[in-house]
Amino acid sequence: MAGGSGTRFWPRSRARVPKQLLPILGGRSMLAETCARIAPVVGRDRVLIVTGRTHARAVRAALPRLPAANVLVEPAGRNTAAAIALAALHVARVAPEAVMVVLPADHAIGDLPVFRADVGLALDVAARTGALVTIGVRPTHPETGYGYIRPGAAVAGARGRVAWVDAFVEKPDRARAERLLAERRALWNAGIFAWRVSSILAELRANLPAVVRPLEAAVAAGTRRALTAAYRRVPSISIDYGVLERARRVAVVRARFRWSDVGSWAALAALWGGNGEGGNALRGRTVPIDSHGCLVDSPQRLVALVGVRDLVVIDANDAVLVCRKDRAQDVRLVVEELRRRGLRQYL
Amino acid sequence: MAGGSGTRFWPRSRARVPKQLLPILGGRSMLAETCARIAPVVGRDRVLIVTGRTHARAVRAALPRLPAANVLVEPAGRNTAAAIALAALHVARVAPEAVMVVLPADHAIGDLPVFRADVGLALDVAARTGALVTIGVRPTHPETGYGYIRPGAAVAGARGRVAWVDAFVEKPDRARAERLLAERRALWNAGIFAWRVSSILAELRANLPAVVRPLEAAVAAGTRRALTAAYRRVPSISIDYGVLERARRVAVVRARFRWSDVGSWAALAALWGGNGEGGNALRGRTVPIDSHGCLVDSPQRLVALVGVRDLVVIDANDAVLVCRKDRAQDVRLVVEELRRRGLRQYL
């Protein structure tokens, strides 16, 4: 899933270059990292990318060795249910009995062999039980930006690492997030799923016929025009809310790998690690003087810091961001203000 | 006096473009502002600029209407005593009975008519009494970066606005600066002087013969080679320490105009005034979100601030400075570090 055009990595991310197309973690885009991460599990030629019109060309350029037909272009953004339905319908045409794994293209994952083993386990359980399988991450703090999963009884034959899901909890308020953390049982919903294609399509047909029926017709017709017409009618709804919370048999694998959805510049500081003096996370040519806890990303210009603490400083071609680290979520307010002022060249 | 290559306005000021050549206050360089400020008092063609080799070309470009001969180029920097001696010797050749006023090229002055009247008064007293006349500024805070002047008995016939100097106090420590402020009598030495050319040359000959004798010979010879040879022998010493503190008859005019030596980016914030929301001083295209007390100078790129307080953010072509406002003096540490690393392109 490589749709979406986030605003939280402005000024590096722009409408035409969203986060998943940026080399935010390493030398290549997050999308390319994601493909390299999953290819050994499913086979390089079996990776499908679902993206939007605006980014299709950039996606193909980011993955030059991927067959062109593996990039599925949505005529409009309709949230995760439509994107997943579209991909499942494409898989079903060539392999109706296949299992599939769904991954966001813009997450950071550590411990790759463990990740691949956990995904393999999720695929095994999905194939064996026919359930929808999610991957749950052990919470480290009372995050209010994620959904939570309450695991229940163990799934038989999975060495205690997979449980049937008791309940999904939508993004909680702070107090509820703290209670969920205190339970020491609830897991973060990482948005990574495994299932039989036949299972997810059956659940989509049962729970979201308005999403899957028009897409089935369009994929059967096989034309761009049909797809565009279908997307005009498809409602925008998430797979979590539209399917997972309503499905009867959902299981969750307890992840053993490190995971981050890299939700803001502040999250990056932890992922890059403090590589400079004073626990600064620095990229590019920087001169930190008596400055601590800062994240600096400046591929071109030199950035000098004097006497500052816990700042995010991002230098882009035409814009510079200076943001308090604990306000990194509010970078979207800059994007809103730019839009309000009609400064489209910075969007 | 347009010598010196300060480091406190990095990254805008560079070795080749020091503060006095920058349009830090308005649309033109501080040097051009200074010339425009004094020209109505002395006549445009009677303004002499003393500058260094590195900056001579830029000085002439900044003042295209000034006769080329009015730019006196020092072969090396030797502090204010040599610069003033060189200028006085040039004036003496054409007008030995003249009075002259000496101004730093990089100060900010408010209330121009008042400034011109005060300079006129200083020149009058200098012409009438033969004294060395300084201009003293009423302190607003216990500054440790300036020298102080203790005024004594009133100079007759100057309506109580000019006093004989009792004592000069060199840059004090904090405790002494606080006592001087509490006296409500001591004045800051603003580095603006008026005197008869014959008076300053007599005092230079009496107190600093090692400075003035080689320069007299070189100016008489009239060649660049002679001047270069002379400057090799001239000691580096300030006019305050070398002459004013030792001279017998020194007077001080109490300034009524607003004055700042614009010693750092932080000083600029007060001079620009808070022109944005939240008392930010902003130049260029800026998007301040919940940010206060910041100074931003970014002529080319857009600068966005999120949740920050009391920062200086300066965007130059090849470098960005992010500095706590109360640490603005420490910008020189960046320049030192750049020198240490051999990053000469940023100096």
Image (tube, coloured by chain):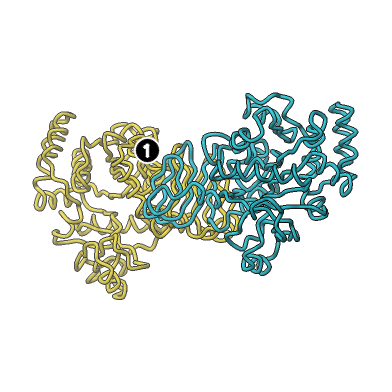
Chain colours: A yellow, B cyan
| In the depicted structure, whether residue B71 falls above or below residue B133 | above
In the rendered image, residue B140, in percent from the top left (x then y), is placed at: 57, 59
Image location (x, y in percent) of residue A101: 28, 50
Whole-percent x and y of residue A242? 15, 54
On-image quarter of the C terminus of chain B: top right
Residue, disc 1: A346
In which quadrant of the rendered image does the N terminus of chain B lie?
top right
Q: Nearer the viewer, residue A268 or B213?
A: B213
Residue B210 image offset from top left, x and y in percent:
90, 44
Label 1 crowd bin: few (<14), some (14–19), many (20+), radius 10 Å? some
Side of A232 relative to A251 (left or right): left
Please, is residue B298 above or below residue B141 in the view?
above
Q: Is residue A36 visible?
A: no
Check disc 1 and give the amino acid type.
Tyr
In-image side of A294 versus A89 (left or right): right
Residue at x 16%, y 31% (from the top left corner): A222
Which is nearer the eye, A45 or A340?
A340
Number of marks drawn: 1
Instruction: Tell me the SS state at disc 1.
Output: helix
Residue in front for this viewpoint, B140 or A5: B140
Identify the residue shown where x is 57% and y is 55%.
A306
Does residue A174 appear in the picture of this structure? yes
Q: Is residue B82 above or below residue B181?
A: above
